[in-house]
Amino acid sequence: MPVPVGCRSLPPERALPAGEAGGRRAGDSWLPTGGGSSPRPPAPRSPRHMGRGSGNAELAMAAAPVRCPDCPGPERGGGGGTPPVPHLAIAVDEGDVLPGALRIVRQLRPAWEPATVKTKLFTDGITNKLVACYRDEAMGDALLVRVYGRRTELLVDRETELRNFQVLRAHGCAPDLYCAFQNGLCYQFLPGTALGPQHVRDPHIFRLVAREMARVHAIHANGSLPRPILWQKLHKYLSLVKTELSPKDVPSPEALQQELLWMQETLSQLGSPVVLCHNDLLCKNIIYDSSRGRVRFIDYEYTGYNYQAFDIGNHFNEFAGVKEVDYGLYPSKEMQLQWLHSYLQAYKELTQGHPGDAQVAEEELENLYVQVNKFSLASHFLWACWGLIQDKYSTIDFNFLRYAKLRFKQYFKMKPVVSALQVPK
């Protein structure tokens, strides 16, 4: 989700680091250079990059972790042809991250003279702390050190996140991962512009996003039949809401339980394929590199196998923004069909071996449109429950309860609308 700071414009020819502040909301007034200028207006800063956390143990596509005798935690296994990720026996103080981050840099870049290392602390992240360490003003050599936030284990399975990071990297969909440490990760900076709500509506941009999502969805499981994480996660979040929270002005836990059971029965019958999904594709989790004409996705805390239509419907919900939510920005059917056509064409090329000439039938396009809009309900429900949990535990200055109420309101508003949609016979 977004960052609880005021919206700012990104200056031209500026960049945001990949995975800034580690998730659902990361925002900061400091914007490193790099990546070239965007041909379109720069993105406003949204309060969204906030690590929302996966929490599913069944997603592993990489090899099982191997014990490191020198570390209290396991050395993180590779997989997909990737080497194991080094694990450093360093714990970084969440309240004072710079000394620990510099210790990590000394381990990874021993040739760097300490006096030449520049640092920048990103202060507006919602879930994690992030610091960039670099020598080159253009950030070409930057390392990003991300320190996990307090109580994020409630929402995030860090071992699963690490495995998925490696899988995506092995397929060219993520930056280099340099190491794990006791309470965080260190990885490569990606140059480019973090997108805003106006960018994801641009036909040139949204076709790139659609094709990149197809690339992620086309990554195969290692010989297993994966199960979707959606229902496990929803039941887990709702359980936390029921046992630990007592929010006012939201539906009762009993009513929410009934809604969840209805969704599970209804949506699981739609026939949406289970694929590797990002699951948190808000605008700021998309980095546009204009010099290469490509987008990359960042923040993999919620990545895992899920329904294809959920990943797309969740992204469409994010067109509304986060700090100032406007569901009038939800894409029209015409825009959705254009987006979905680009997606299906790319997905079929990647999975069916028809490069450049994959045909998309009107019926399958309409079918995906219906599935996506029905699954958008589950997205509202998920992040509403997430907001209630964050409202209790997060120390960040953001109105999570208000956000949760907005998502519940939109869920109940759209439920009869999308329920009326019929899959083509």
Image: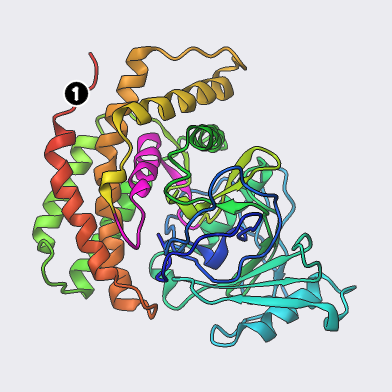
For the magenta stretch, what is the residue range? 301-325
Residue 23, percent across and down?
48, 62
Query: Looking at the picture, does residue 111 appear above or below residue 222?
Result: below
On the rendered image, what quadrant is the C terminus found in? Answer: top left
> Residue 239: which quarter of the image?
bottom left
Query: Looking at the picture, does residue 385 appear above or below residue 130?
Result: above
Amino acid found under the numbered disc labelled 1? Gln
Left/right placement of residue 388 relative to residue 118 reads: left
Residue 74 appears anywhere in the view:
no
Residue at horizontal 60 percent and vertical 60 percent from the top: 16
Residue at horizontal 34 percent and vertical 63 percent from the top: 323
Q: Which residue is mark 1?
A: 422
Residue 328, percent across and down?
26, 45
Residue at horizontal 66 percent and vertical 83 percent from the top: 98
Q: Nearer the viewer, residue 365 or 100?
A: 365
Residue 257 appears anywhere in the view:
yes
Residue at horizontal 20 percent and vertical 42 percent from the top: 263
Query: Looking at the picture, does residue 21 appear above or below residue 381?
Result: below
